[in-house]
Image (cartoon, grey):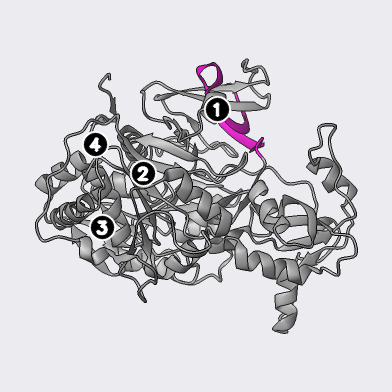
């Protein structure tokens, strides 16, 4: 494989190799800050080697897979590097998944071992109506798990093991898509994938060794891994990973960790912007924030908090082929220009390029092999379709101007974007239709006052059923990921279909614009005697309006 560099950083290196170099070059610098604990590069390397020794005893080794169902913790980061230390692929699973979605993720990966937070063992077992079909160890968090699961702490040996000799083409991880064209798929990605994203971020965002990179989003997202932990590894900087995003704690955590750079996604920037103004808003160490979407009021946000905001386009499959460079002026509405490591084409339905200003599908082709996904694990058909005519087809609609500025227009995929999560409409529909009194269902995204979308479902009852919206919501809350549970529910007599029998969601939105709609948030507000926030309603066109143009959130 041809050696390559991005911004002076060699992208042929493996993550264990980078950790070895970092521990040798900056042994006493803080690499990872989590839960108030700071871990140096040297200490982190030792802990990885000791955990790897125990994982090897459980059969984890070259070309095997280690699945994890873990919330953000140092233990989770250790499992990632320990798996790669042994030449295995690290497979993080969305901790919100339940039922069929969780079952599919585990069966698809068929891991040698699965590590789960102790309190997540019960939903893991429930997804299989009993005991999981793979060996399980539980992470030392909270109460112990039932069943045959062992404790992760028992795998941390005193005697470390040496890293397995390997080259960067080896699969480093499998990152699940959100399932925007059906069930979630697992993207097989190489060490080059992680290192190249980090190198692009270092160069295009102007990151520095003195930076503390703060990310409050899950480690099963590329934002926390490829774009936070790995850049710190490359530069000798510090990665500060929060447990989860909290508007009330966000700036306190930024100050406590000394964060100079943070990322945002979905509604988080809007939530921070809508918070009550404080005299010390600008009294924080942050100098830079990157993410999407970037709204029109971004200049006011920058001035209020004393920092610079940058935008990009990315997906779990395609790396970050479009970025707004830190030293270039902002073009309103644009997510940036193509990075030199990728060829970009805005194409029509035949894959042919369209002129500037014309909307088309974004196609991506890497100039450096291994910098986008290698393929969808266990799904050769989907892989071949995605790479038709030697271009990766993103399914996203964009347009470009004469200066190669890229403007995100919308998604060609059947997905709903809610509070930083891409949600498969199919998986929502399957979850609702699992209710015995639901005949069929269609899920759509409708506008949210926090930007992005809320989940709305149109439900056809079984004839004669007394089913009500509250019962559907209770069923969904018990069987689906929290972000998948619909806020809006409407009952309809039938769903409009295409000639091939598929639900026509465009016709559905037009025909049912005035259908009565149950709103979960209004129910909660009425139960607590709190007024419904301005702009929210339980029926009418608010929940069916034409969606505004939205720019893509980073990484599915």
The mark closer to the camera, 3 or 4, is 4
Q: Which mark is residue 226?
A: 2
Badge 1 vs badge 4, beta-carbon distance below 8 Å: no
**Are dots 2 and 4 in contact, CB under 8 Å?**
no
Q: Which residues are magenta?
A: 387-413
| Residue at (62, 39) in percent of width and height | 181
Do callouts 3 and 1 mark residues in contact (Cβ within 8 Å)?
no
Closer to us: mark 1 or mark 4? 1
Give the spatial CA distance, label 1 vs label 4.
Answer: 29 Å
Which residue is depicted at the point 65% across and 61% down?
A: 485
Tag 3 secondary structure: strand
**Toward which corner of the image does residue 320 lie, by quadrant?**
top left
- Identify the mark nearer the N-term, 3 or 2: 3
Question: Which of the pair 167/435 is nearer the observer?
Answer: 435
Q: Nearer the viewer, mark 1 or mark 2?
A: 1
Q: Which secondary structure lies at badge 1?
A: helix
- Name the one closer to the observer, 389 or 64: 64
Which comes sooner in the sequence, label 1 or label 2? 2
Q: Is residue 383 left or right of residue 449?
A: left
Question: What label does residue 14 carry, if any?
Answer: 4
- Where residue 97 appears, x then y in whole percent? 53, 57
Mark 3 → mark 4, Cα distance in angstroms: 19 Å
Q: Which residue is mark 1?
A: 381
Horizontal arrangement in the rendering, residue 555 relative to residue 5 (left or right):
right
Which residue bears the numbered disc 3?
32
Dot placed on the residue nearer the N-terminal end, 3 or 4:
4
């Amino acid at each position: 494989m041809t050696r390559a560099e991005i911004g002076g950083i060699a992208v042929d290196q493996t993550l264990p190799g980078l950790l070895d170099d970092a521990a040798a070059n900056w042994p006493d610098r803080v690499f990872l800050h989590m839960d108030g604990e700071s871990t140096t590069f040297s200490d982190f390397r030792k802990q990885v080697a000791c955990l790897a020794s125990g994982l090897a005893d459980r059969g984890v080794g070259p070309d095997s897979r280690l699945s994890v169902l873990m919330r953000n913790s140092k233990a989770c980061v250790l499992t990632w590097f320990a798996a790669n230390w042994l030449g295995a692929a690290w497979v993080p699973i969305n901790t919100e998944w339940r039922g069929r979605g969780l079952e599919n993720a585990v069966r698809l990966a068929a891991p040698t071992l699965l590590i789960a937070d102790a309190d997540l063992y019960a939903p893991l077992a429930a997804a299989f109506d009993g005991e999981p079909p793979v060996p399980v160890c539980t992470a030392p968090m909270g109460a112990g798990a039932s069943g045959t699961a062992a404790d992760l702490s028992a795998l941390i040996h005193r005697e470390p093991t040496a890293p397995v000799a390997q080259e960067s083409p080896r699969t480093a991880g499998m990152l699940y898509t959100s399932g925007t064209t059906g069930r979630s798929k697992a993207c097989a990605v190489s060490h080059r994938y992680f290192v190249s994203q980090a190198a692009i971020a270092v160069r295009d965002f102007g990151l520095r060794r003195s930076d503390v990179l703060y990310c409050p989003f899950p480690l099963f997202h590329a934002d926390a891994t490829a774009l936070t932990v790995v850049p710190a590894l490359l530069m000798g900087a510090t990665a500060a990973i929060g447990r989860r995003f909290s508007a009330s704690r966000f700036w306190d955590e930024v100050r406590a960790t000394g964060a100079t750079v943070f990322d945002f996604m979905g509604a988080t920037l809007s939530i921070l912007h809508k918070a009550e103004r404080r005299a010390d808003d600008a009294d924080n160490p942050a100098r830079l924030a990157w993410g999407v979407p970037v709204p029109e009021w971004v200049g006011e946000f920058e001035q209020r908090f004393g920092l610079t905001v940058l935008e990009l386009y990315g997906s779990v499959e395609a790396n970050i082929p479009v970025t707004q460079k830190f030293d270039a002026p902002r073009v309103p509405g644009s997510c940036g220009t193509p990075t030199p490591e990728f060829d970009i084409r805005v194409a029509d339905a035949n894959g042919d390029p369209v002129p500037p200003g014309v909307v088309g599908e974004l196609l991506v082709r890497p100039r450096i092999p291994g910098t986008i996904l290698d393929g969808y694990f266990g799904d050769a058909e989907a892989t071949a379709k995605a790479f038709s005519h030697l271009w990766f087809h993103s399914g996203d609609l964009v347009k470009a101007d004469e200066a190669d500025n890229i403007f995100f227009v919308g998604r060609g995929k059947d997905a709903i974007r809610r509070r930083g999560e891409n949600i498969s409409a199919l998986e929502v529909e399957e979850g609702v239709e699992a209710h015995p009194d639901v005949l069929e269902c269609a899920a759509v995204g409708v506008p949210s006052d926090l930007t992005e979308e809320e989940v709305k479902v149109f439900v056809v009852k079984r004839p004669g059923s007394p089913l009500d919206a509250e019962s559907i919501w209770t069923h969904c809350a018990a069987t689906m990921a929290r972000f998948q549970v619909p806020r809006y529910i409407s009952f309809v007599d039938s769903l409009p279909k295409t000639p091939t029998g598929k639900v026509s969601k465009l016709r559905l939105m037009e025909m049912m614009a005035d259908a009565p709609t149950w709103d979960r948030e209004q129910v909660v507000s009425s139960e607590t005697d709190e007024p419904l926030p301005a702009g929210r309603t339980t029926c009418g066109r608010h929940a069916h309006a034409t969606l505004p143009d939205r720019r893509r959130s980073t990484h599915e």
